[in-house]
Image (cartoon, rainbow, N blue to C red):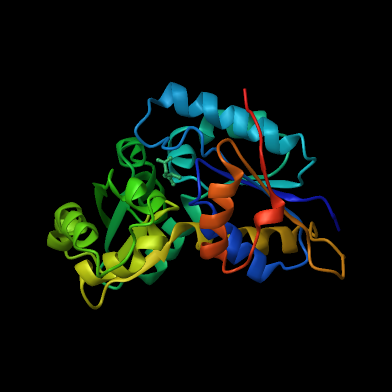
Amino acid sequence: MNSSPIGVFDSGLGGLTAVKRLAQLLPHEEIVYLGDTGRVPYGSRSRETIIKYAREDARFLLSHSIKAMIVACNTVSSSALDVIAPEIAVPVFGVVEPPSARAAALTKNGKIGVIGTAATVRSGAYAAAIARIDAKLTVTSAACPLFVPLVENGRVSADDIAVTTIARDYLQPVIDSGADTVILGCTHYPLLAGAIALVLGEGVTLVDSGAVTAEFVAERLRSADLLTDRAKPGRRRYFVTDSAEDFAAQASRFLEADISGTVEQITLG
Ligand code: DGL
């Protein structure tokens, strides 16, 4: 039993996809979220810069005496986790392995698509994780660099012609591959799930990397007896490196709850 908070970080808003699922599964747990909104996006940056930012994010969460950390950013999970995880004294979970295992279990034709930022696709982390599970599975990856700015600007509707035009262009290689299961390998992408599903067409299953990782972490913490015995709902605190008001407005819409009193702007580094 352990009543310390669970720490979650992302470069911005996207990691809330993991928080939302975690809060549904573990309502009594305290959660500390860090969104590095002042420096988003990470996905177009060099590996050295991503490692530097990730170290600062992790250090901030550790200062809140967390019992476990979710790196709810695919870019960091795929490009920097191997470097930062050994430096962290609590269990650390990235968002690559759990969705890879889920996709491998779900695919019927053995063809998996992976979409993510340029850094995530460049890292090859998903293809490697899937090959470790089953070397016979084929993986087709596509970088979708404009998806994050679209989400950060609230352009997520499947009726938005800009969104569907860009999605058609990016997703064509995945469509051509015949993949029946596609990993949303970026925590922002579930917000575009409607448009992505429309473009990919019927019969394609989407795997939400943040939500699947939250399910995996909940199970791990439960089996390690690391959950709280608190009877009341756990406190939620959100820290950002740019405007707290802007984040609160966007996050409240996304989480379908008013979080404005719980967001604080901080400085990292
Ligand atoms: N959170 C990042 C990810 O999941 C997307 C945003 C960014 O590029 O920083 O890859």
Eyeballing the image, is 118 above or below 224?
Answer: above
| Relative depth, front residue between 149 and 42 | 149
Question: On the picture, is 99 further left or further right than 143?
Answer: right
| Residue closest to the far front | 245
Corner quadrant of residue 207: bottom left
Question: On the picture, is 16 further left or further right than 187?
Answer: right
Q: Quadrant of the C terminus?
A: top right
* Location of residue 189 in the rendering, given as x and y in whole percent from the top left corner: 38, 57
Eyeballing the image, is 84 above or below 204?
Answer: above
The residue that appears at 66% across and 34% down in the rendered structure is: 266
Eyeballing the image, is 202 above or below 123?
Answer: below
Give the total of numbered labels: 0
- In this view of the protein, can residue 185 be seen by the observer? no
**Ligand 1 appears in which quadrant?**
top left
Question: On the picture, is 87 further left or further right than 233?
Answer: left
- In this view of the protein, can residue 173 be seen by the observer? yes
* Location of residue 44 in the rendering, given as x and y in whole percent from the top left corner: 34, 33
* Location of residue 142 in the rendering, given as x and y in whole percent from the top left corner: 24, 48
The residue that appears at 33% across and 43% down in the rendered structure is: 117
* Location of residue 205 in the rendering, given as x and y in whole percent from the top left corner: 33, 71
Q: Quadrant of the N terminus?
A: bottom right
The residue that appears at 55% across and 49% down in the rendered structure is: 247
| Residue closest to the far bottom | 202
Corner quadrant of residue 221: bottom right
